[in-house]
Structures are given as C-alpha cells and as structure tokens.
Amino acid sequence: MSEMTLDRQEPVANKSLFFRRWLRNPLQMGSIIPSSPSLCRKIAAAVERGPDEYVLELGAGTGVISAALLAAGVPAHKLIVVEIVPEMADFLRRILPGVNVICGDAFDLKNTLPAHMHGQIGTAICGIPLVLLPLERQEAFRDAVESVAPGKGFLLYTYCATSPLPYRKLGLTARRMAFTLANFPPASVWRYRP
Ligand SMILES: C[S@@+](CC[C@H](N)C(=O)[O-])C[C@H]1O[C@@H](n2cnc3c(N)ncnc32)[C@H](O)[C@@H]1O
C-alpha cells in the first residue's frame, strides 16, 4: 500500500478505532468521536512552550490534537503523548513518527514519564474526561501533573458550558481560553493553574 493510500484511509481508521474503544469503555473515552479540527487548532493555539520545553498530551486517543500541535510548530521530539490503551498507543506510534508516545497512566506521571522529562514541560493538555470523575480522582490528576510540571497546571477541553472542574476546591485558578461551535458537541478550552 502506498503512503498516499494510507494517508487517505487514516481518518476512517481513526474514527472506527475511536468508536470501537467507546463501545468497550465509554467512561474512559468520554466522547463518541475525536475532537474536531477547529477544537484541535484552538487547543494548539493555547499552548505555551519555551524553546527547550516539551508539550505533554494526556489521553491522546487517535492523535488528532497531536497532529494539530505538530502543525502548529511543536517539534515531534518535543511532543510527549500518553495513552492508556495499548491498541491506541500502537496506532499513535505508527501515525506520529518521532513523537514520544508512551503507553501508560496519566494518573501516575511520576513513573510514566522518564526522569529527564520531569520539570521540562511547558504545557500539559488533558484529554481525559475528568468531569465524569469524583473529586478524589480529580485531585489525583492535579497532583500527577504537578509532580512532573510544577506550577504549570493544564489545559482541559470540555463540552460543559461552565468550568468542568470545581477549581476552588482543587486549589486551582481557572480561565476559559477558547470556545468553538465547530465540534460535536460545541466545546471550550480551559486553563487551570495551581
Ligand atoms: C475523549 S478521548 C480524547 C482523545 C483525543 N485527545 C481527542 O481529542 O479526540 C480520551 C482518551 O483518554 C484516554 N485515557 C483515559 N484514561 C486515561 C489515563 N488514565 N491515562 C492515559 N490515557 C487515558 C482514553 O483511552 C482516550 O483515548
């Protein structure tokens, strides 16, 4: 199969893999289809990164945001994507050459990320449906990010009309960075900081 044919088939493979995983575990996936190009571009535009810093994407799914980050100029070797489902991590390795794809748990970043990446992260992006989780799990996520990206907080995209996290209870500040109608459902991008 030529590269060209493979590229044309990728979006179909992407949506079908996403949907199959949603059928298997709807709570872990949180959405029935991948984020739209508009939402992915808005997330990429909210990224802050020093020249030597990494961007960390948690819950990369089929890599639509990863691709937007690369298109926005994040070098492949400065992008780390963490995905808990081995089949999806394998897919990501295939479509994102040069990117640091890690199959692991975003709630255990201290052990999931190699030590040399700790403290070197400009922006963390959360794709995990935190809004569906109890406060203790949201706290665990906040602490996991803080353990590898101290003081940076994270970006979170959501379909909620208001903040998806009880940020005061979590000791975070919150700011809505962007909104798009061109996503199913319409979505916002929030930045949370300690
Ligand atoms: C809503 S999907 C987002 C996919 C993609 N980023 C997008 O916007 O289309 C959530 C993804 O998070 C992954 N995930 C869920 N829990 C995770 C965890 N604890 N660690 C890493 N990835 C996780 C799921 O397997 C799924 O691929």
Image (cartoon, helix red, strand yellow):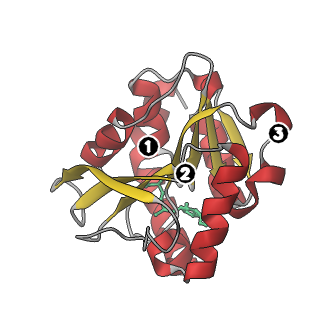
Q: Quadrant of residue 83?
A: bottom right
The one of 56 and 99 positioned closer to us in this rendering: 56
Q: Residues within 10 Å of mark 3 (few under 14, many from 20)?
A: few
- Furthest residue toward top: 51
Mark number displayed over residue 114:
3
**Secondary-structure class at tag 3:** loop
**Secondary-structure class at tag 2:** loop
Q: Image point 49% across, 74% down: which residue?
A: 169
Residue 99 position in % (x across, y down): 64, 31
Tell me if the residue at label 2 has its CB under 8 Å from ligand 1. yes
Left or right position of 57 against 19:
right
- Furthest residue toward bottom: 134
Tags 1 and 2 touching, CB below 8 Å: yes
Q: Residues within 10 Å of mark 1 (few under 14, many from 20)?
A: many
Residue 186 position in % (x across, y down): 21, 62
Q: Image point 40% across, 35% down: which residue?
A: 68
Q: Image point 44% across, 75% down: which residue?
A: 131
Q: CA distance from mark 2 to mark 3?
A: 18 Å
Which residue is the site of mark 1?
65
Q: Image point 71% across, 45% down: which residue?
A: 148
- Furthest residue toward left: 181
Q: CA distance from mark 1 to mark 3?
A: 22 Å
- Amino acid type shown at disc 1: Ile
Tags 1 and 3 touching, CB below 8 Å: no
Q: Answer with mark 2 or mark 3, whichever residue precedes in sequence.
A: 2
Identify whether 133 is placed above or below 62.
Answer: below
